[in-house]
Image (cartoon, rainbow, N blue to C red):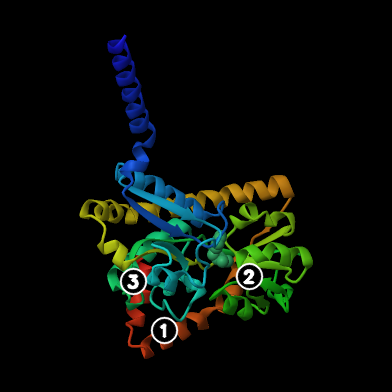
């Protein structure tokens, strides 16, 4: 009887240990926990790439690292992201550099009207530029990857076919894009992307300027029945990590993250370009959106209005002691 009880108790304990090992293994193994902050809502491309990176890092470190993701500004918002990561409020964060044109002068050169054709090209050109010039703006963080959205287009409630149609039109734009809309005669209104839904509903803005995946991701196609294909400028993004947290990581974990740097950039650019195609098809089918393309003459007219932007950037960057012409030349070469 006593022998039977001992056997049962041993079996019971054995089962518990096995269950704990099987079900708790990832938790127990996840010795390093990192918080990753992001500013836009979960379904948008900056957050989709964040989830992909989390999965890859956890997998490639065999559960040694656990990443907790915070989309939608739940840990840090767009403007406070860089300083929040430097201060350690989040271990990792995603910044849109174009929201702070004066802070990231070198990398923001990729958001000049230089003819970057898509997100994949933009993402890799941006990363190459960063690697070559190692800008001072990033001296207090470690860059985990960089990527870009696709070129911006004008999404509106009423059709825009010529520069005359743009005159005085209130359009949402963020960061450096405001001067583009101004140069085209529109009235740029700055606001975060999520606030644009309400602004379109209330009529405070008559449209927006951004990459076209937002037609689907934010359902802007419900309000904007017209898209003018200006195909102008990308926005550069960076994923940055707190330096102390980085220094505390084991070398094998650091290697996993560094090996992912370019791969993640390429993955995100490719994902974004794909989303653009899906958003265009969905906007046409589900919401009957009309896409307006320019003749070569009309396109030249719109582009010529933007030439001063690159000229001003060169002047400003030269004054700051940066090799402005070389940076522009490099971006053009990277695009090729
Ligand atoms: N065009 C910029 C950046 C951007 C493009 N798509 C998204 C989605 C979510 C956040 C930012 C962006 C902008 O208009 O903010």
- Residue at the spot of label 1: 314
Q: Position of residue 219 (x, y in %)?
A: 67, 54
Mark toward the viewer: 3 or 2: 3
Instruction: Give residue 165's quadrant in the image.
Output: bottom right
Left or right of residue 303: residue 238? left
Decide if ligand 1 comes within 8 Å of the CB at mark 1: no
Please provide percent x and percent y for residue 239: 40, 62
Taking depth in this image into account, of 269 and 46 the one nearest to the observer is: 46
In front: label 2 or label 1: 1
- Labels in figure, total: 3
Across and down, in percent, residue 322 comes to 33, 83
Mark 3 / mark 2, whichever is N-terminal: 2
- Circle 2 is placed at which residue position? 298
Marks 2 and 1 sit apart, C-alpha to C-alpha, by 26 Å
Which callout, 3 or 1, points at the residue further toward the start of the chain?
A: 1
Q: Nearer the viewer, residue 226 or 52?
A: 52
């Amino acid at each position: 009887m006593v022998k039977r009880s001992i056997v049962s108790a041993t079996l019971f304990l054995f089962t518990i240990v096995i269950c704990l090992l099987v079900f708790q293994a990832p938790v127990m193994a996840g010795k390093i926990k990192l918080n990753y902050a992001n500013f836009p809502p979960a379904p948008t491309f900056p957050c989709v790439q964040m989830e992909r990176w989390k999965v890859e890092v956890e997998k490639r470190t065999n559960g040694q690292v656990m990443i907790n993701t915070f989309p939608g500004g739940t840990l840090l918002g767009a403007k406070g992201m860089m300083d929040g990561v430097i201060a350690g409020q989040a271990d990792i964060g995603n910044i849109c550099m174009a929201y702070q044109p004066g802070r990231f002068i070198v990398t923001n050169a990729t958001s000049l009207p230089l003819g970057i054709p898509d997100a994949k090209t933009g993402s890799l050109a941006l990363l190459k530029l960063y690697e070559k010039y190692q800008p001072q703006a990033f001296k207090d963080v470690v860059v985990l990857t960089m990527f870009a959205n696709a070129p911006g287009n004008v999404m509106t409630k009423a059709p825009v076919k010529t520069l005359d149609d743009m005159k005085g039109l209130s359009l949402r734009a963020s960061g450096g894009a405001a001067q583009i809309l101004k140069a085209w005669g529109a009235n740029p209104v700055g606001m975060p992307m999520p606030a644009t839904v309400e602004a379109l509903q209330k009529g405070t803005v008559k449209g927006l300027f951004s990459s076209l995946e937002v037609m689907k991701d934010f359902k802007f196609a419900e309000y904007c029945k017209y898209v003018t294909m200006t195909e102008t400028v990308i926005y550069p993004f960076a994923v940055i990590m707190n330096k102390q947290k980085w220094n505390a990581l084991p070398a094998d974990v650091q290697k996993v993250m560094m090996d992912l740097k370019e791969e993640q950039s390429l993955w995100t650019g490719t994902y974004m370009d794909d989303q653009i195609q899906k958003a265009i098809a969905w906007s046409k089918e589900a919401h009957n959106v009309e896409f307006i393309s320019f003749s070569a003459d009309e396109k030249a007219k719109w582009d010529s209005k933007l030439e001063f932007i690159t000229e001003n950037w060169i002047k400003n960057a030269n004054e700051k002691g940066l090799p402005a012409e070389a940076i522009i030349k490099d971006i053009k070469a990277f695009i090729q």
